């Protein structure tokens, strides 16, 4: 809750984790995307501050800097994306991008397919299989739908939006320093 000192109130975000669980006894065994994504969704819906998650995602889409969804759902690669040791500013930017992707994707799933379906994938293992089972679509199909939705329905961030995001310009500049392999689709 340290963020409160800087005028941020992530109470709803953190309560979402506490009330709904996170992995097996708050470990990383179930990955991060549904848990962090839902916490962002809940913060935007019920919290004090709204983060323009789809507009930020539009910025990544336009700059061709999107992290493939299969990397975000994989428990083999998600630690490096969501729990990157923050050594340089580019590490913070990568973590910020991962949270933004998760928040945008989960918000898309809930708003498009409903909360009941999302509840069946929240904090579950083998998300690739769960997506197919619950949504009847592969991870790649859901990703294409989501990114197309963002591209067709959202405008770029305006100055007011950018000012709501701590260190926005520094983070965006540091995105160009992130290893380009992270953005590769294969």
Image: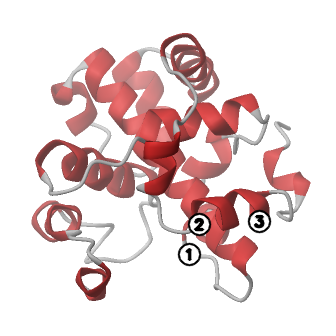
Front residue of this view, candidates 173 and 21: 173
Q: Earlier in the sequence, mark 1 or mark 3?
A: 1
Q: Circle 1 — which element?
A: loop
Up-down relation of residue 4 to residue 179 (above or below): below
Left or right of residue 135, residue 64 in this image: right
Point out residue 144 in the picture as x, y percentages from the top left corner.
62, 18
Q: Nearer the viewer, residue 63 or 19?
A: 63
At x 46%, y 59%, the residue is 165
Residue at which label 1 appears: 83
- Whether residue 176 appears in this view of the structure is yes
Neighbourhood count class around disc 3 (C-alpha, 10 Å): few under 14, some 14–19, many 20 upward: some
Q: Secondary structure at mark 3?
A: helix
Classify mark 2: residues with Cα within 10 Å, few (<14), some (14-19) or many (20+): many
Q: Which of labels 2 and 3 is toward the front?
A: 3
Q: Is residue 136 above or below residue 143?
A: above
Question: Do the CB atoms of the residues marked 2 and 1 lie less than 8 Å apart?
Answer: yes
Label 3, on which residue? 174
Identify the mark nearer the N-term, 2 or 1: 1
Residue 121 percent location from the top left of the image: 32, 39
Residue picked out by circle 2: 95
Residue 146 percent location from the top left of the image: 52, 22
């Amino acid at each position: 809750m340290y963020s409160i000192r800087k005028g941020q109130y992530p109470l709803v975000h953190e309560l979402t984790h506490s009330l709904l669980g996170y992995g097996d006894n708050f470990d990383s065994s179930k990955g991060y995307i549904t848990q962090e994504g839902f916490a962002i969704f809940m913060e935007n819906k019920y919290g004090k501050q709204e983060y323009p998650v789809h507009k930020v995602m539009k910025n990544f889409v336009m700059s061709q800097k999107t992290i493939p969804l299969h990397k975000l759902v994989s428990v083999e690669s998600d630690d490096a994306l969501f729990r990157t040791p923050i050594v340089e500013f580019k590490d913070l930017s990568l973590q910020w991008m991962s949270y933004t992707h998760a928040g945008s994707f989960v918000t898309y799933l809930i708003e498009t397919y409903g909360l009941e379906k999302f509840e069946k994938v929240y904090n579950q293992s083998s998300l690739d299989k769960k997506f197919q089972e619950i949504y009847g679509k592969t991870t790649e199909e859901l990703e294409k739908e989501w990114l197309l939705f963002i591209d067709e329905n959202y405008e770029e961030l305006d100055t007011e939006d950018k000012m709501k995001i701590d260190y926005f310009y520094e983070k965006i500049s540091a995105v160009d320093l992130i290893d380009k392999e992270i953005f590769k689709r294969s």
